[in-house]
Amino acid sequence: MRAPAFIAAAALATVLASAEAVAQKDELVIGIGQFPQGFHPNLASHVALSLIHGMSRRPFTVYDAEWELICMLCETLPSREAGTIRDWTAPGGENGLAVDYTIRQDATWGDGTPVTTKDVLFTWEIGRDETAGVNNQELYRRMEKIEATDDRSFTIYWNKRTCEAEAINDFNIVPAHLERPTATDPAAYRTRNAYDSDPTNPGLYYGPYRVTRVEAGATVVLEPNPHWWGAPPEFKKITVRTIENTAALEANLLSGEIDYIAGEDGISLDQALAFEKRHGERFNVVFKPGLFYEHIDLMLDNPALQDVRVRRALLHAIDRTSMSERLFEGKQPVADTSVHPLDSVHVDDVRKYTFDPQQAKALLDAAGWTDIRDGIRHNAAGEPLRLEIMTTAGNRVRELVQQVIQSNLRDVGVDLRIRNQPARVLFGQTIRQREFTGMAMFAWFSSPQNVPRTTLHSTMIPTPENGWSGQNYTGYRSEVMDEAIDRVEVECSDADQTEHWTTIQQTYAEDLPVLPLYFRANAFIMPKWLKGVTPTGHQYPSTLWVENWTAE
């Protein structure tokens, strides 16, 4: 009769010891799959960086987990009703807007310097200089001027009327007191800015945490910002550890080397599904569908890919439905365009490409690739239909998808060669400077109703002359697409919006500058004791609310 009591006492002691260990947990180690290609918020664009900046910065405006636009760095959202959005005529006579913002009174950089309109004006000035090579130069072109009323209040004068004038999510300010001296030569700013030369400088950050240590390619350590104005974060240190091999990422979680795999940049869905079956009693696995678009950018400078018949043939040849069902248990739906069905602007009436090898062969025949030797098609000049596909090395699911695509294309006579690179090289140079020759497989993550200007407008093609700004890596040029993008941003009636979004999606599906694959569902794998993590399902990460994370 005493043994059960002894066992019960031992079990109680184990529970109490476990509870005490959790209560004492003041450090969190997050595992991700890629290391940021840089730390400057306007010169680098990467999901890993967004996770880090979610803890160390705050945008003026952002979409929350309910996909509602909210203020973070500003006091209140501007509106016409409040008189803080007004019509304005630009110098050239264009219909523009004047929009007022007020910075939070308690906003302070991590070195104690107040966040002021000096930072706003400096960021705008460097963003307007094309030689500086900021990512979203179109944003700064549209800001005709900014006037500061005082240290906290300013007005943006837009040279075009836009349908979401209150949203300045991508206007990422940087500290003038640190960055102005390095920007005297804007052309050199990309390499001399403090975010990349001195990333642990506390004055670069103004979120709940600030970056205190960086081990290039491996680790970023964040510690609480003593000048943070919001609720104090619970963890005394958060370490973001990069493990580029997704199998190793999972192994490190199981061994306790990391606590949590971030869903925004973690393991693939197929791994997560298997992981949940094996280890669901130890971890909470949350699957969040959202605006994460896995696709293949095509290099349209490649003569073979300039023919739309070839591009359509490639997509008909890839069995995306079987890929989704077998690898992801149907949780990652096949994409027809870049706009997710969950998005309110999604259009279903577009050209669709079912798995049809015979149609693919017919299209390749019509395009002149009719001479088949050893199973590979050649054109009249004797050139083989040979393409190269690249993606992030060590990402197991992408490498598996590559092999499926390689086999599918071989069946229709296309010789596909695989060459992968580490993420820091692929995104830091190869894709950004358009050095891939055929196909580049990666994912875009976006906000709701995100106008695809930077990825599809012809003015957004990166070149040495524009400092490799823009994200139209394919080199896509379409007058129809350009016009629809230009108009969807300024013609705001429901009828106009429907018309322009329909044109954008139908043109995308007709022209296929990109091969759509599927929409990702991200898997957040958390220890049972980690609470408060709320996936958003869009480009703005869960770390923007890191001060709500607790160990319980």
Image (cartoon, helix red, strand yellow):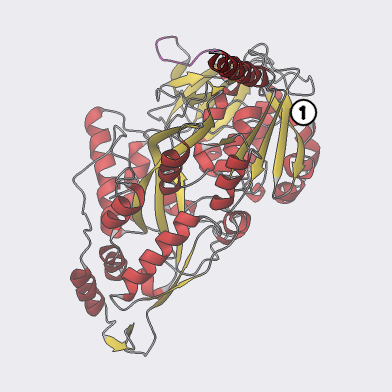
What is the span of residues highlighted in magenta in the rendered image?
Answer: 73-82
Residue 165 position (above or below residue 326): above
Q: Position of residue 486 (x, y in %)?
A: 37, 42
Describe residue 548's horizontal placement relative to residue 452 as left or right.
right
The structure residue drawn at horizontal position 37% and vertical position 75%, both measured from the top left corner, is 304
Q: Residues within 10 Å of mark 1 (few under 14, many from 20)?
A: many
Numbered label tally: 1
The structure residue drawn at horizontal position 52% and vertical position 55%, both measured from the top left corner, is 395
Instruction: Find numbered disc 1 in the image and state the secondary structure of the residue it sits on.
Output: helix
Identify which amino acid the numbered label 1 is placed on: Gly
Farthest-out residue, front: 1
The structure residue drawn at horizontal position 27% and vertical position 56%, both measured from the top left corner, is 322
Which residue is nearer to you in this view: 2 or 11? 2
Which residue is nearer to you in this view: 16 or 251? 16
- Residue 350 visible in image: yes
Q: Position of residue 404 (x, y in %)?
A: 37, 65
Q: Which residue is mark 1?
A: 203
Residue 348 position (above or below residue 318): above
Q: Position of residue 381 (x, y in %)?
A: 36, 90
Q: Is residue 321 magenta?
A: no
Instruction: Give the image quarter of residue 501.
Output: top left
